[in-house]
Image (cartoon, rainbow, N blue to C red):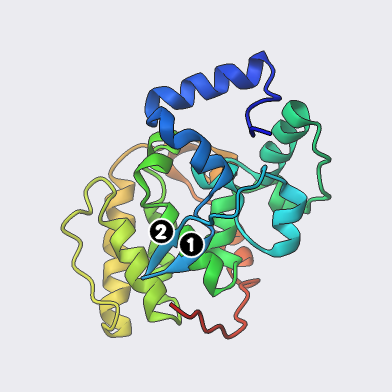
Amino acid sequence: MSVFSAMNNSSTQHLIRITRRIQPDRIATTATCPHTAYGLLKAIRNHTISIPDLKQDLAAKRPNACNQCHLDKTLKWTATHLSDWYSIDAPELDADQSEVAASILWLLKGDAANRALAAWTMGWSDAQATSGNNWQSIYLAQLLNDPYLAIRLIARRSLQTLPGLAELKITPLGSDAERGDAIQSIIATWDEDQHPSNPALLLGPQNTVQTNRIESIMKQRDDTPMTLTE
């Protein structure tokens, strides 16, 4: 059965809006073959075709297709739409999963695989077309201090796709001081523009950022050692 076959009028209108931004022949593959596998220092499509099911994705500790495009939305937002559109039961979610964009949670508290996938996704043009590209930098900057050099490299690559950062000069193997300077430069570039308040992105009025909550999330990072074969 097609993942879109059960769509009601509301979900069809959503698909139309997405289609205007992303090539139509890529819509179905994005939903049913999401970028949930890692290889060659990037995310690659999982070619096991399936209908998005948030409960299964959470149990498997993997990103879901919906939030890989809608980087600025929470898991609660996804659960609500999957329930409304496909009658898929919503899983139990904690406060962070209900209130904070899923991509930020994957990036800041996920295991190494999820951090790598989230870092790549934030530089993915299709996701940026859906979710914007002017807010991710302050989160990607945190990964320049990741214990895994591969994740630092992926984060740098995605940072260079964002406004004002194409010429970003930072070496993943650089010293703590060099990476610290780069992070401060990225934050300063972000702060040059006005960003609307968005609770899911932990952004308040007048470019304020919920730093205490970000630090709390980062303290929960899954540092389980991982070896990902290419």
Label 2 sits on what residue type? Answer: Trp
Name the residue: 44% across, 59% down. 44
Q: Quadrant of the N terminus?
A: top right
> Outermost residue toward the top?
9
From the viewer's perspective, tell me whether residue 49 is left or right of residue 188: right
Could you tell me which secondary element the residue under label 1 belongs to?
helix
Q: Quadrant of residue 151?
A: bottom left
Residue 13 on image: x %, y %: 56, 16
- Residue 154 visible to the viewer: yes
Residue 130 on image: x %, y %: 44, 34
Q: How crowded is mark 1: few (under 14 residues within 10 Å), some or many (20 or more)?
A: many
Marks 1 and 2 in Cβ contact (< 8 Å): yes
- Separation of marks 1 and 2 at Cα, in angstroms: 5 Å
- Residue 70 visible to the viewer: no
Residue 216 on image: x %, y %: 63, 65
**Considering only vertical position in the picture, is 217 above or below 2?**
below
Q: In which quarter of the image is residue 169?
A: bottom left
What residue sits right under mark 1 in the picture?
117
Could you tell me which secondary element the residue under label 2 belongs to?
helix
**Considering only vertical position in the picture, is 20 above or below 145?**
above
